[in-house]
Image: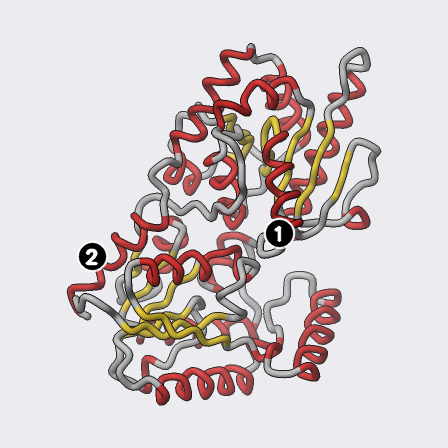
Amino acid sequence: MKEKLKIIAYTGGDSRKTSTWSNFPYFFLKTLEDKGHEVIRVNIALEDSNRLAWLFIKSYNKIYRKIFKNGLFTVGRWPVCRKLVRKKMKKALDKHPDADLLVSFDFSNSIADMTDVKTLLFCDWSIEYLVRYIRKREPTKWEQKLIADQNSVIDNADYVVSIFPNAKDFMQSRTKNKIRFYDGYVINAMAELPPAGELAEGRYNGNSILFIGSMKYHDSAACLIGAVKRYNDAHKNSKPLSVNVIGMTEGQLPRENFVKCYGYLNKDNAEQNKLYSHLLTEAKCLVNTQTLLGGASSIIEVMHYGVPVIVTETPDMDRLLGKDAAFGLYCRENSEDEILSSIEKIESLSLEEYKTMSQSAEKTVEHYTWDAYIDRLLDDIGKTL
């Protein structure tokens, strides 16, 4: 591999912002730059082209999702839009014909069929995996076309990386191309906190439960609120538990006086990052029992700061965190009963037991660094660059 690679990175949003796709492009590309590689960043989001495009796409997608709750045929997946995106990608390559690698943070957009430059697709899961495995239904006629188009993109890429093991296995069964998964995960950490050991006693004596997730995780947040309500009703002589929700607003969740919603907190904003850090500082535990594994990013981040977690055990979670849930507690399913039982177990711990759980959470993810992850990636694909 060349000592210094020139990489063109295509992202659906500004990759300099941590808000773009759960921080992944930001940390991925920053780590490459820290290692001395040159990164050309290209924002392929059509809604960022101009104000009129932004207004139309945002309005259409909002209305579409209200009518078709789980629909996937949003503007970005229209054939005409994909052609415009490919044109934008090729234009960037024409400006930098000496590029060594093209990275797309998307399994649907690539120009591998238009160039000899090596292409890498880095994303979470395919459309077919989302429909069949996560939503557990058959794809519609329109979705079958989207799936076929995406599978063609995956087949033509030089390298394809999924960040989730089960998604990788599913996708591998659909293509002859090699789908890569690198054991472990990565910590998207930007909070400014003291060492976890210094926070354990304060968290133990506190009463704050943290939830992080967008509307995709609404069911888990609603179950958590129901479980905490039942806990508080059953322990009226104790200090009531409170729930802090990052990622949703009050109008999106059941209204209870022990719930505070903060909406999306942008880590690029100093004040919002400070608030985010404060909420992590006082969190006794994090709860997200929905089985949609996209929430793994925030789960692993809070574990890095010594916050125990209550999550649902799935094959993916077992592979990421291990079957021994010393870092917190596993639930069998996303339900009020399961969450309530887990909260009661956390509340019954002694200080020393809680400190041990906090230390285990931090230790479980201590090797999940972006530096190590990018090294594994480059060691793998670098042989052909």
Comparing labels 1 and 2, the label whose residue is closer to the camera: 1
Q: Quadrant of the C terminus?
A: bottom left
User: Which residue is pictured at 53% across the width and 55% down the height?
Assistant: 22
Left or right: where does residue 374 sit relative to residue 20?
Answer: left
- Residue 69's x, y, as percent? 69, 62
Front in this rendered view, residue 143 or 288: 288
Q: Nearer the viewer, residue 144 or 370?
A: 370
According to the picture, the residue beneath numbered tag 1 turns out to be 270
Q: Is residue 3 left or right of residue 27?
A: left
**What's the colour scheme?**
secondary structure
> Residue 96, image x and y in percent?
33, 84
Q: State whether residue 279 is above or below residue 19.
A: above
Point out which mark residue 58 bears. none
Residue that appears at 60% across and 77% down: 48
Q: What amino acid type should be assigned to the residue bearing mark 2?
A: Asp
Tell me where residue 229 appears, x and y as whole percent: 77, 27
Can you identify the residue that label 2 sits on? 379
Badge 1 crowding class, 10 Å Cα cut-off, few under 14, some 14 to 19, many 20 or more, is few
Residue 241: which quarter of the image?
Answer: top right
Secondary structure, mark 2, is helix
Task: Kindly indicate the quadrant of the structure image that contains residue 289.
Answer: top right
Residue neighbourhood size for the residue with mark 2, other residues' Cα within 10 Å, grouped as few (<14), some (14–19), many (≥20): few
Between marks 1 and 2, how big is the CA–CA gap?
36 Å
* Helix, strand or loop under label 1: helix
Q: Is residue 37 left or right of residue 247?
A: left
Q: Where on the picture, by quarter, is residue 178?
A: bottom left
In the figure, 272 relative to 60: above or below?
above
Query: Mark 1 is on which residue type?
Result: Ala
